[in-house]
Amino acid sequence: MVDLFSIQDLLDQNSGNKKNDSVGGAGLHVNSVDTEKKLQKKIGQVNLKEREVLAERLAIQINYPHINLEQFPVSHEALRQITKEQARNIGVSCFYISQDQIRLGALDPTKEDVQAIFKNLQEKTHTQGVLYVISEHSLEKILKLYDTLPDIKPITKNVEIRAEDLAKVQADVSDFRSLQALLSKASTTDILTFILGAALKVDASDVHVEPEQDKVLVRFRLDGMLHDASKIDSGVYKKLISRIKLVSSLKINITAEPQDGRFTIRLSEGDVDVRVSVMPTVYGESVVMRLLHQSREGLSLDSLGIRGLAYDTLLEEIKKPNGMIITTGPTGSGKTTTLYAVMYLLNQSDVKIITLEDPVEYKMEGVNQSQIDKSKGYTFAKGLRSILRQDPDIAMVGEIRDLETADIAIQAALTGHLMLSTLHTNSAFGAVPRFLSMGVKPFLLAPALNVVMGQRLVRRLCQSCKKEVSLDESYTKKVQEIISTMPEKEKVEASKRGKIFFKSEGCDECHSLGYKGRVGVYEIFPIGDEVEKFILDGQISEYSIRELAIRHGVLTMVQDGIMKALDGMTSLEEVFRVIQ
């Protein structure tokens, strides 16, 4: 409670002192000044108490805990979790962090920006979080503490990996053995160039640097499979990590926290965007560099492996002016690439296309591409609302993860927009049950969906060393069962080709792997009238939708894989490895 009596005493005392001062001389004037100072201090304390009382009342109203940070010790590590600009503009601060807990204080914890920062920090630090109400005085105290932070900045020198250096490396690299020989002679500054040059030569999608107890492995992901490319010693490894952090604009002195960065390799045939992820492990920092080729000229549906009736069906559906086109599959199954191929067909001068991605993986001319930023509250749902205010003809959302995003996307599809997006399900037939499990209303979903695609990526057989093989009894029986359930047209096609399948032993062309490149296997499921009735019933399962789709002539992924194996594009082993 505010101490009004003590203030009144000071006022009375001050009044008496002034009277005495007029009669009593200079000594009493000093007492008057002291009293004035005491009075101002007391009023300031009362104001602080009032501000804390207001913060406490707000905390009770919104059901959040309250804390007074006046005497709370705040570490530099806690301060660095939120920038001074964010703290000042949003009214939020981090005042405590440990290995398993993070605590934030905010003027209003219910604000959307505060909630976004809170959730992002929990995910980033992998800790449990607590959000408190604080007063303006507590926030002012935190803002002053930022001035005490030591000036630790990431090293961001202009370091480049030159295209001519990569070309020299590629001329000397023919296989993993030659890479190992190169790395054993390479200087510290050249080792990253050698690794990236070799990765680009063999068309790797990822480079992994993984420290273990007695060695450090460099592994390349080729056509979805990881392969040991070389080994490096621990001394070289530490210098390599510093070099990677340097070109990626990461903090070299931070080794106990995950970091994400990027850099670009500029080549004559098109830029390669390198996304870098560094994560602490038991034996050191593990690094993954993802290589993204920005050039996507000439990307087409048939080059991805969509053909026949599936191709005709998809082409018909993407010509519609509104509705939803959904592609499904696990991470790394090529969903985004398929959507880019669709956008490549739709990208005309009289059409406006906007994308919302996490992250933007490929640049496409003529398309407005936006990247979400959860740390600033820019989520898929919030971004999608903004997209629709831009009046696009076509919108692509990287992924539908929650009910809010699903509802906005469906409403957009029903109000004249063509929506493209992805969903994490095992097959095209699981998309509808997934939407319903999110809470989407069946009577909105049914008219909104145009087509759902399921897909996987299988490795292509090396055309230089592939040869015919005969199947054993178990494989023959399995293949016959799958062919017997195919639509009549594909069944006839399969019988014409006989039972000739192929396998590759490996050669110099494919680096002795037997495979080179990848191709998609698809199931493309248009949502017709009968399927709409199923959805409106609401009592559906993946199995029942699958049975309905097969009756209507939809070729499943495994059936499409068998047809591609008969064509010599891939092997049966690869089809059954990818599609269980």
Image: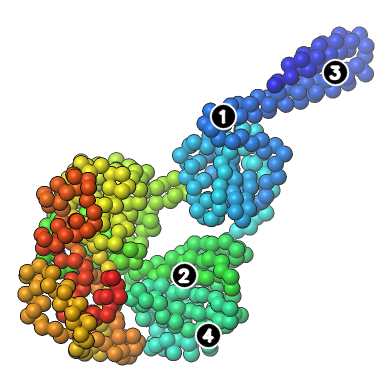
Residue 406's place in the image compared with 264, above or below, is above
Q: Secondary structure at mark 3?
A: helix
Where residue 396 sits in the image (x, y, percent)?
A: 28, 53
Residue 565's place in the image compared with 535, above or below, is below
Residue at 29%, 66% (x, y): give it: 334
Residue at 67%, 38% (x, y): give it: 69
Q: Secondary structure at mark 4?
A: loop
CA distance for labels 3 and 4:
80 Å
The residue that mark 1 highlights is: 60
Residue 346's place in the image compared with 89, above or below, is below
Residue at 22%, 51% (x, y): give it: 540
Question: Label 3: few (<14), some or many (≥20) within 10 Å?
Answer: many
Amino acid type, callout 4: Ala
Horizontal side, residue 258 vs residue 33: left or right: left
Sequence order check, earlier mark of 1 and 2: 1
CA distance for labels 1 and 2:
46 Å
CA distance for labels 1 and 4:
64 Å
The tally of labels here is: 4
The residue that mark 2 highlights is: 288
CA distance for labels 4 and 2:
21 Å
The residue that mark 3 highlights is: 32
Residue 186: image tag: 4
Sequence order check, earlier mark of 4 and 2: 4
